[in-house]
Amino acid sequence: MVAQEVIAVDSTGVARENPLLEVASAPKQSDSILPFKRFKAEGVSAVIGGYVVLDSDIDKSYLEFKQNGVSVEEITRCELLGKLMEDKLYLHQAKQDSIMISDAEINPQVDQLVQYMVGQLGSEEKVVAYYRKDNLLQLKNDLLKAKREIELAKRMQAKVVEVVEVTPEEISVFFNSIPQDERPVFSAEVEVAQIVVEPKFSKQALQGVIDRLNELREDIVEGGSSFATKAVLYSKDGAASRGGLLPSMRRGDPYSKIFKDVAFSLLEGEVSEPFESEFGFHILKVDKIRGQEIDVRHIILFPELTNDAIDQAKDRIEKIRTSIINDSISFGRAARLYSDDSNTSNNGGQLVNPTNQDTRFDLTKMDPTLSAQVYNLAKNEVSKIFVDQDRTGKKTYKFLTVTNKYEEHPADFVKDYEKIKSLALRQKQIKTIELWQEQKIKDTYINVNKDYRDCVFASDWVKK
């Protein structure tokens, strides 16, 4: 055997001029046999409990950043490895804590992602080819695994900080610890109210959709037809492609109350009578009951709107707007009396920011459509009438007003107490996570490839 010096490239991409590999010359009596070469298998960068981080995982992270338009010029492999190890630590601990996520919870996200990619590339075949998979099922399985790991890591992190709270004293100490010239500057904000008018369905249209659902139910219950097949053919929402299957449901999940009440009143395999929720008209079937969790399929239909109903809604909202402009009624009172938006009418039409449950909206971060509708409005000015259209194609009419404006300003402890509280809470949560990581790293089997042991990590991954 003749040793041959080769330049090997380690998993950090650094060339090393050491004779690391041996190439064996073929035996003389068998010149037809190709020389045997010992290649390093795909590099394992680190092992965290029962999970591994591969060199290719780091490469994929770089690729994902580039695809999302993020500059990777100053991001090192050490930094990416640190982030990937952190994710694996969450996954490892989630497994120890028996945090589970069912396929039914993740499948809708995967289906939505695949549909988006098909829309971008043009066909399922092109999507499969782009991701270099053998078929769509293989791609979906890979996406399912990736989505599950992301969600598990999120839930584990949420569990770590779920009991963290800040006291008024901690908030005060946090704020006063920030030098005055370094205190955050809060962007301009607005408070917005709206009045919404929805076209009303005729009694005939409402009865028609109930009759149709009764027909479908009879075919299923009496005729033995498949609920899933009927859902694929007739249901009017995204779950139709999955035979009407929804993510596994628990009583505390954010479904419509009436929907949950009907679902949890049924036996396994039972099909409900038609019922109405704020989203439409349904029948549903319970596929499986697992303790406090159920698998549900549904079929949803929507009644048709007549042109007369649409014209009546337009006329109604124009009259309401004119009355406000003429000072015949205040915006808040008109919202309470006439707005069809049950979420805001009782509060005088006041919108609530979904990100923080506050009434203030940061003009630089609010929904672009809403921002465009109110950006140039003066305080108490009434907007023109806008038309909104939901995923079912149903149109609603609305107009808005700005009830308050807050200019950009340095943080003020009294005026911005809730924002300062959020910052103080976030800082405490970060410290809690750091302490949790420190302890779990000590308690968990971790092995970092020697190529990365000189990295300067934020956490003590190499347990020096």
Image (cartoon, rainbow, N blue to C red):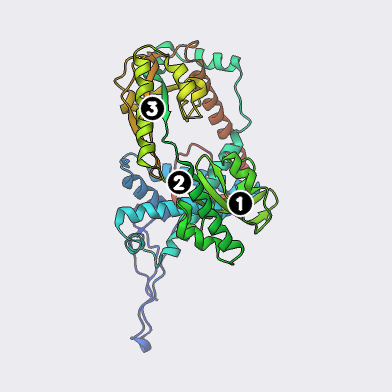
Residue drawn at (45%, 21%) of the image: 335
User: In this figure, which residue is indicated by the disc labeled 2?
Assistant: 303
Asked whether the viewer can see residue 45, the reply is: no
Q: Earlier in the sequence, mark 2 or mark 3?
A: 2
Q: Is residue 111 left or right of 100 when viewed as pictured?
A: left
Amino acid type of the residue that numbered disc 3 sits on in the rendered structure: Arg
Amino acid type of the residue that numbered disc 1 sits on in the rendered structure: Glu
Q: Residues within 10 Å of mark 2 (few under 14, many from 20)?
A: some
Amino acid type of the residue that numbered disc 2 sits on in the rendered structure: Pro
Q: Quadrant of residue 143?
A: bottom left
Q: CA distance from mark 1 to mark 2?
A: 17 Å
Residue drawn at (37%, 17%) of the image: 323
Q: Earlier in the sequence, mark 3 or mark 1?
A: 1
Q: Quadrant of residue 134?
A: bottom left
Q: Is residue 320 above or below residue 232?
A: above
Work out whether residue 117 or residue 348 is closer to the camera in this orientation and state it: 348
User: In this figure, which residue is indicated by the disc labeled 1?
Assistant: 273
| Residue 253: % across, % down | 59, 41
| Residue 259: % across, % down | 59, 44
Identify the residue at the far bottom of this view.
29
Q: Is residue 327 left or right of 254 when viewed as pictured?
A: left
Q: CA distance from mark 2 to mark 3?
A: 21 Å
Q: Is residue 71 left or right of 136 when viewed as pictured?
A: left
Q: Is residue 231 above or below residue 354?
A: below
Q: Residues within 10 Å of mark 3 (few under 14, many from 20)?
A: some
User: In this figure, which residue is indicated by the disc labeled 3?
Assistant: 316
| Residue 117: % across, % down | 35, 54
Q: Earlier in the sequence, mark 1 or mark 2?
A: 1
Work out whether residue 273 or residue 19 is closer to the camera in this orientation and state it: 273
